[in-house]
Amino acid sequence: MSRFALVIAAAVIVILALTFLLPGGKVNVFKKEQAGEFNVTIFHTRYEPNSISVNHGELVRLNVVTAKGTASYMHGITIDEYGISKLVTSETIPEAIEFVAEKKGTFQIYCGTCDQGPFGREHPDIRLTLTVN
Ligand SMILES: [Cu+2]
């Protein structure tokens, strides 16, 4: 390989590294306590917190546990617009739900288990509002 080719290869590697590793690059490695990280607890009738707000394009992580005594109810997190539906069955070890907030708007997060149960989506009225600005 000629010296010129080596220089070009090195330049390409540096450009790729700058593109993907610096903040704002395409690969966003999640850092602990990043702005888009939220601890969520599921109760029979509500999520805590019941609304979260993130920035468009942000990597979001929801660390979700189910409230004490509710693990067997198989509550969960469903976000239709993001194709997410997960059961949360631990009261102590958070289920990490990650996604990139690529769609702007206001979305209703609900419990898919309750939605398909005898009371339907409206009862219990478990809602978490996700706003992507
Ligand atoms: Cu539920």
Image: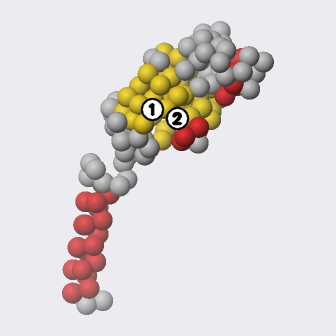
Residue under the point 65% across and 9% down:
69
7 lies left or right of 70: left
- Secondary structure of residue under mark 1: strand
Do residues under tags 1 and 2 come within 8 Å of each other at their CB atoms?
no
Give left or right: position of 39 versus 45.
Answer: left
Residue under circle 1? 106
| Residue lying at 65% horizontally and 18% vertically, measured from the top left | 122
Color style of the picture = secondary structure
- Answer above or below: position of 131 versus 46: below
- Please provide percent x and percent y for residue 63: 49, 27
Where in the figure is residue 43, as x and y percent of width and height? 58, 13
Residue found farthest to the right: 118
Q: Nearer the viewer, residue 20 or 130?
A: 130
> Can residue 74 be seen?
no
The mark found on residue 67 in the picture is none
Of labels 1 and 2, earlier in sequence is: 2
Q: Which residue in the structure is indicated by mark 2?
A: 97
The disc labelled 1 sits on which kind of residue? Answer: Thr
Q: Residues within 10 Å of mark 1 (few under 14, many from 20)?
A: few
Task: Tell me where residue 116 appears, x and y as whole percent.
Answer: 74, 26
Residue at left offset 54%, top offset 28%: 109
**Residue 21 on image: x %, y %:** 30, 54
Q: Nearer the viewer, residue 64 or 31?
A: 64
Classify mark 2 as within 8 Å of ligand 1 or not, answering yes or no.
Answer: no
Look at the image and tell me whether residue 55 can be seen: yes
